[in-house]
Amino acid sequence: MRPYWVTKILLCALGLVLAGCQDNSELKRTLAETGDKVALLEHEVDKLSTDNTQLKRAVSDASEEARTARADARDAKNRLATLEAQPGTGGPVRPSESTPGKALTADEISALVQAELNKRASDKAADDQARHEATAAEQTKKMEAIAAKAKEYGLEFDPKDPQGSFKRIMSDPQTRRKAMDAARTEARNQRFAQLGLDERQSEQLTQIENDTRKQIDDLFRQGLQNGQSFEDTQRQVEQAFSDANTRAKNVLTADQFKTYTDLGGAQAAGLPGPGGGGDLSKLFPGIAPEQPFGGLPPGPPGGG
């Protein structure tokens, strides 16, 4: 809303017109000056309105900070009261302790609040550092275990460069195949460990799965050579898995066989070839993505 004196200037200008002033040029100049003054005053009013909004925001922010400071002060005073109620707790001497019963001054409260905030920040920084060191130590331990396991299979793996080592292994067809075979063996060992097999059962079940993999490999190869449809090959593969599970049932106890089938049965050994049975996460956990064993590809190997 414009101030009263702005309106008064406008009324005066209107009065000049109504009075029939003879000097039109003077009247025009007066009206132009009046218009300029009005525009300037409107600008000042808008500026004052903007400044008032910013002032209100600053006051609101200051009020929030004050509420936070008061809450911290109350917390600090409560902590001090708890400490005072426990003789022999030690700690820094407060300025007001020289006069028992005297209320804390504003400066004393501020100093105590700041000390408490500093302590919390220090404790948080120490906790963060401890967690970081523990995580780094665990990661180092994990990478060293992967390097040791890779070495067992003749694979070079630098625990200080896990991603680079993995890429180098996978970029060479020979080391990639070796890694796939190693991952398959690791997966089988993990499954067999849950079955509680004796040495004889372990050897027989390993033979069953190896035979099945070779049989399925032959089925795919023959199917491609003979122009057989993928659906027919798929039915033959499923029958091979079923036969393998039947052979496994004759080797395992009832409880072992149930666990074996819960873990995927013969299908968990994976399909032969580059696309199956190579869950590298079993050999490189946390580096290679997990890819379940078993199952049939969406089409014949090599596409189609």
Image (tube, rainbow, N blue to C red):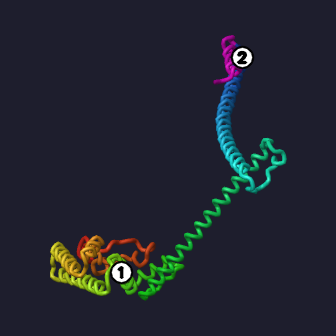
Q: Which stretch appears magenta?
A: 1-20
Pointer 2 residue: 23
SS label for mark 2 = loop
Q: Is residue 189 left or right of residue 230?
A: right
Q: Secondary structure at mark 1?
A: helix
Against 73, residue 168 (above or below) is: below
- Mark 1 crowdedness (10 Å alpha carbons): few <14, some 14-19, many ≥20: few
The residue at which mark 1 appears reads as 189
Residue 230 in the image: x percent, y percent? 18, 74
Residue 198 x %, y %: 32, 84
Side of 125 where 221 appears, left or right: left
Q: Is residue 116 above or below residue 67?
A: below
Nearer to me, 39 or 183: 183
Measured from the top left, where is residue 287 in percent x and y?
45, 74
Q: Gap between marks 2 and 1, in whole Å?
A: 111 Å
Q: Please identify the quadrant where the C terminus is shown.
A: bottom left
Q: Are marks 2 and 1 in contact (CB under 8 Å)?
A: no
Foreground residue among 10 and 160: 160
- Viewport quadrant of the N terminus: top right
Q: Residue at x 78, y 47 (%)?
A: 108
Indicate which disc residue 200 carries. none
Q: Mark 2 Cα within 10 Å, few/some/many (few <14, many 20+)?
A: few
- Asked if 31 appears above or below 145 in the picture, the reply is above
Badge count: 2
Residue at image x 68%, y 13%?
A: 15
- Amino acid at dot 2: Asp
Q: Amino acid at mark 1?
A: Asn
* Label 2 or label 1, whichever comes before in sequence order: 2
